[in-house]
Image (spheres, rainbow, N blue to C red):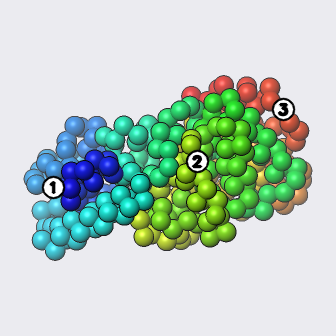
Amino acid sequence: MSPELEAQVGVTHDRLTLLFILDGLKGFGPQKFKALHDHAVDVEAVVRNPEHLPLPGKTGDQLRQALAGLTDAERVLAHDRAARQLVSAADRGAQILTYDHPAYPRKVFVSNNPVPVLYARGDVQAWNGGKAVACVGSRNIREPYSGLQSRFAAHAAGAGAVIVSGFALGADTVAHRAAVEAGGATVCVMPGGLDRPFPPENKELFEQLVKTPKVAFLSEFPFGTGASGMNLRKRNKLIVAAAAGVFIGQSSSDGGAMNAFRFALEQRKPVATFLSDGTGDTSGNQQIEAETKVPTVAFPTETNPEAWDAWLSRLS
């Protein structure tokens, strides 16, 4: 693996191999990686000598034992996997972001979901240009909510906010398109590898946006990974982690967008929506209105830039 290719992608083959080795250990999730970083303990030191792992108690003992028991075959597997990912990233002009990469999104690092390896295509600085706002909602979003979703996203993007969404049909696509048309930045968080656009109905949009300034595609899933129900849920958690607040234009109480609401509660992030119209399509909006665990607001179902600005200004 040439130094030029490693520099192009943003991580060395050796380092990515070490990260894959640790990621392959049962129970070694994002918070464990963050603990290493916070204790200034390098992954190489831990893999070479498990006693350097700064985790106490039974969990720490189990992980040290697992590290000590790593086989040559497991190391070779991680080495080969890292090589494939580096080549795939280079072929697509992508970056592989670790905590030390200057483009790694700070909001994700300080969240409860500090994914140690992220894959990015497009303008990898897009999410560092301003306050990030998650804009999600129903795949079957309808009027007046679809128009309001578009106007809110365009207004926020025009005011300098970065619109983060999941590239799904419906509300997500509405938000991404509105941000781009307003000349703002948007981040498309994907539920699979960045070589597998999902949903397939948005493949043409993917090919268009990946070449558009101020647009980035972000995923925690390696190249070659397909979308799945679990990955869609993880995608929603990453959307919330990358944002200062969550805006849900329209959702039923059992809609997929409510996963983002639950992750916002878990991550203690403000949530906004529009007032429910009393139908099942907006029963999720009504649930958000009634929530007291985090600051929530339900905007009137009319264009209201002053109220939107007031909410946006409160996001940290």
Helix, strand or loop for disc 1: helix
Q: Quadrant of the N terminus?
A: bottom left
Q: What label does residue 92 carry, if any?
A: none
Quadrant location of residue 58? bottom left
Q: Which residue, given by chain and number where applicable, does mark 1 sit on?
A: 47
Residue 179 shows up from this direction: yes
Q: Quadrant of the C terminus?
A: top right
Disc 3 from disc 2: Cα separation: 29 Å
Q: Which residue, given by chain and number where applicable, does mark 3 sit on?
A: 304
Query: Which of label 3 and label 2 is nearer to you?
Result: 2
Q: What label does residue 212 carry, if any?
A: 2
The front one of 23 and 28 is 23
* Residue 177 in the image, given as x and y percentages of width and height: 70, 49
Report the amino acid beneath label 2.
Thr
**Badge 3 or badge 1: first in the primary sequence:** 1
Report the amino acid beneath label 1.
Val
**Badge 2 or badge 1: first in the primary sequence:** 1
The front one of 50 and 130 is 130
Report the amino acid beneath label 3.
Asn
* Residue 291 in the image, given as x and y percentages of width and height: 71, 43
